[in-house]
């Protein structure tokens, strides 16, 4: 008599997919299971992604300890790339170039003891037993060693068109600190407002969690993994109808509002395409 071998179930999530499910299970399905993405990319994300790419190149050069002259030569090339980029609208290229120039001037000699990693992805086991394997993934913008023996810090670049501090008790902030093994994070805001005041153009906000708070996030998140695993196993995703956020309506509201599956599919095909799926790295 042979025993059936237990097949362990694996679930891999990042802060985006985790937060999608917590907001609305149906949003998670469309975004992470069906991998729907807009045919026309969301423009604010395009701007943010391009700025992040510029800063990634710049910080990699700083990590390699470029001389000031070599760093300034790189900055000139990055400015040229900004001006050539055709994805900007309404004169945003000039605005973003001016902000990046200010950024380079202000932070060229910032006092980090050491740059540890730039856009370096991780996959870390959140929990495992003989039944499940839960993996948490991410890709922090920047990990640095702070001066004066203050330890490591995770830095997240954020472009904004309206000044608004992010509430730092969130999956990305707490998850990144848990994964890196530190207690300090920092939001690096780059204001893209046309009428921004001097103090709002470039600003940084540091935050610290206790080890107990990070452990609490971990235990809560393990419970959320079990909920997501249950939904995916049963192929059942409940709409929450929490469709509004500070960024506007959920991009799938026009789909969920439709009266039947046939009309929903028509709406999906009109607005979305099937992408490769979002991976942290």
Image: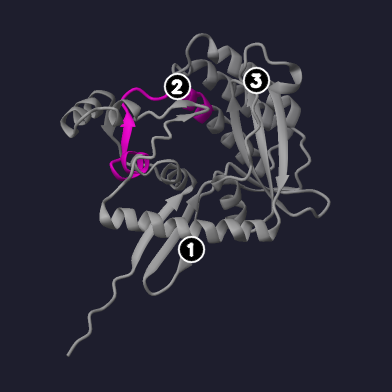
Q: Which residue is mark 3?
A: 99
Q: Please tell me which residue is depicted at 28% across the width and 24% down the height of the picture.
A: 271
Position above or below: 145 against 222: above
Quarter assignment of residue 168: top right
Q: Position of residue 71 (x, y in %)?
A: 67, 31
Q: Main secondary structure of the magenta part?
A: helix
**Magenta residues (range):** 27-50
Whether residue 44 is in magenta: the answer is yes
Q: Residue at x 60, y 32 (%)?
A: 158
Q: Around disc 1, counting alpha carbons within 10 Å, would you say few (fewer than 14), some (14 to 19), or many (20 or more)?
A: few
N-terminal label among 1 and 2: 2
Label count reads 3
Residue, disc 1: 125
At which x and y percent is residue 62?
67, 39
Q: Name the residue furthest bottom.
A: 1
Q: Residue furthest right?
A: 148
83 sits left or right of 227 in the view: right
* First-in-chain label (3 vs 1): 3
**Label 2 belongs to which residue?**
43
Mark 2 neighbour class, 10 Å CA radius: few under 14, some 14 to 19, many 20 or more: few
Where is residue 131, by image quadrant? bottom left
Q: Residues within 10 Å of mark 3 (few under 14, many from 20)?
A: some
Vertically, is 48 above or below 239? above
- Give the colour scheme of this rendering: one colour
CB contact under 8 Å: marks 2 and 3: no
Specify whether residue 166 is painted magenta: no
Q: Position of residue 226 (x, y in %)?
A: 41, 60
Query: Relative to 81, is 220 above or below?
Result: below
Residue 64 appears in the picture as rendered? no
Q: Identify the secondary structure beneath mark 2.
A: helix
Looking at the image, is 138 positioned above or below residue 101? Answer: below
Seen from the viewer's position, the closer of residues 66 and 247 is 247
């Amino acid at each position: 008599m042979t025993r059936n071998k237990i097949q362990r179930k694996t679930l891999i999530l990042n802060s985006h997919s985790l937060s999608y499910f917590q907001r609305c299970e149906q949003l998670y399905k469309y975004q992470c299971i069906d991998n729907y993405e807009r045919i026309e990319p969301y423009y604010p994300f395009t701007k943010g992604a391009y700025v992040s790419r510029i800063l990634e190149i710049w910080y990699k050069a700083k990590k390699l300890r470029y001389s000031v002259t070599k760093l300034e030569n790189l900055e000139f090339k990055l400015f040229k790339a900004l001006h050539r980029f055709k994805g900007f609208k309404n004169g945003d290229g000039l605005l973003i170039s001016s902000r990046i120039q200010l950024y380079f001037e202000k932070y060229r000699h910032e006092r980090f003891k050491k740059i540890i990693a730039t856009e370096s992805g991780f996959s870390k086991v959140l929990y495992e037993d003989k039944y499940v394997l839960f993996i948490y993934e991410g890709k922090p913008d920047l990990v640095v060693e702070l001066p004066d023996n203050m330890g490591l810090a995770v830095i997240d670049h954020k472009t904004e068109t309206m000044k608004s501090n992010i509430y730092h008790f969130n999956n990305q902030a707490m998850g990144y600190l848990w994964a890196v093994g530190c207690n300090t994070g920092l939001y690096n805001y780059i204001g893209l407002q046309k009428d921004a005041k001097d103090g709002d153009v470039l600003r940084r906000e540091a935050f610290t969690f206790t080890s107990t708070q990070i452990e609490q996030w971990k235990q809560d998140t393990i419970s959320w993994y079990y909920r997501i695993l249950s939904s995916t196993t049963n192929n059942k995703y409940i709409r929450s109808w929490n469709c509004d956020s500070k960024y506007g309506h959920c991009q799938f509201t026009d789909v969920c509002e439709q009266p039947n599956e046939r009309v929903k599919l028509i709406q999906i095909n009109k607005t979305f395409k099937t992408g490769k799926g979002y991976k942290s790295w």
